[in-house]
Amino acid sequence: MLNLSGKVALVTGASRGIGAAIAQTLAAQGATVVAAARGSNAESSVADMILKGGKAEAASLDVTDQAAVDAVVSATVQKHGRIDILVNNAGIARDQLMMRMKRADWDAVIATNLTAAYSCTQAVLRPMIKQRGGRIITISSVVGQMGNAGQVNYAASKAGLIGMAKALAREVASRGITVNVVAPGLIDTDMTRALAAGTSETWALQIPLGRLGTPEDVANAVCFLASEEAAYITGQVIAVNGGMYT
């Protein structure tokens, strides 16, 4: 059993799906979780964690707002005295074929998926360096590894996260900070359930394990990387895709 007691974690995009599962799993293992999402969207997830005995609080955060990111990180450190785990999970998709893709949709996806991860990561580095330890875990995607038609902007943002993590892992390793990526495949979330009838079943045929993943599958990988058991793992991409891409 992994033990994250005494650790403080910030999870972005924590209101539903993979983000909510990550926040709940970290809390279940003893971490104090700051669940961040736009508006008050994280409050129901936090309520669930508290009901299950976890320590959690909600934070309203637009990850594309640098000042808001800095404020949430500062408030977390001021209240808890430290920040041990950052999970960059917030993300959006604006799918369209490249020929028809609007610049606004490219910019929105890059800003939310890639630039926001830069902002959140930079904000936590100073307290992590000061305490000489930390875990930075970013959620990429199988699409960032293998590509997918109609998702040029999304694939670019998710591939960029991998490059960012690999470079940063080399920068901060001497400070006791590990930087890793979890790349989910097809996960059973609201987004995949909204697919046209039969599409998700067709996709499942491409997965050797024969099923879509669950948010908990991803959360368990994140929880491991956040733990002391993963202290010698950095700069890596952990694929949680059922064998869809190897």
Image (cartoon, rainbow, N blue to C red):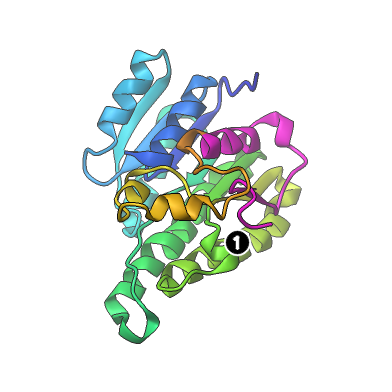
Image location (x, y in percent) of residue 167 = 67, 63
Image location (x, y in percent) of residue 144 = 54, 64
Quadrant position of the N terminus in the picture: top right
Residue 30 located left or right of residue 115: right
Residue 54 visible to an observer of this rendering: yes
Q: Find the residue positioned furthest to the left.
A: 39
Whether the magenta-drawn stretch holds residue 222 is answered as yes
Residue 17 located left or right of residue 29: left
Image location (x, y in percent) of residue 159 = 56, 66
Residue 173 located left or right of residue 37: right
Whether the magenta-drawn stretch holds residue 100 is answered as no
Q: Find the residue positioned furthest to the bottom.
A: 99
Residue at the spot of label 1: 162
Q: Residues within 10 Å of mark 1 (few under 14, many from 20)?
A: many
Tell which of 155 and 197 is nearer to you: 197
Tell which of 168 and 211 is nearer to you: 211
Q: Eyeballing the image, is 162 above or below 25? A: below
Image quadrant where residue 227 sits: top right
Instruction: Check disc 1 and give the amino acid type.
Output: Ile
Q: Look at 68% across and 53% down and name the residue there.
A: 172
Residue 39 located left or right of residue 211: left
Tell which of 82 and 138 is nearer to you: 138
Image quadrant where residue 80 sits: top left
Q: Eyeballing the image, is 147 above or below 42? A: below
Q: Look at 58% across and 48% down and name the residue there.
A: 241
Image location (x, y in percent) of residue 29 = 55, 21
Q: Which residues are magenta?
A: 217-246
- How many labels, in total? 1
Q: Secondary structure at mark 1?
A: helix
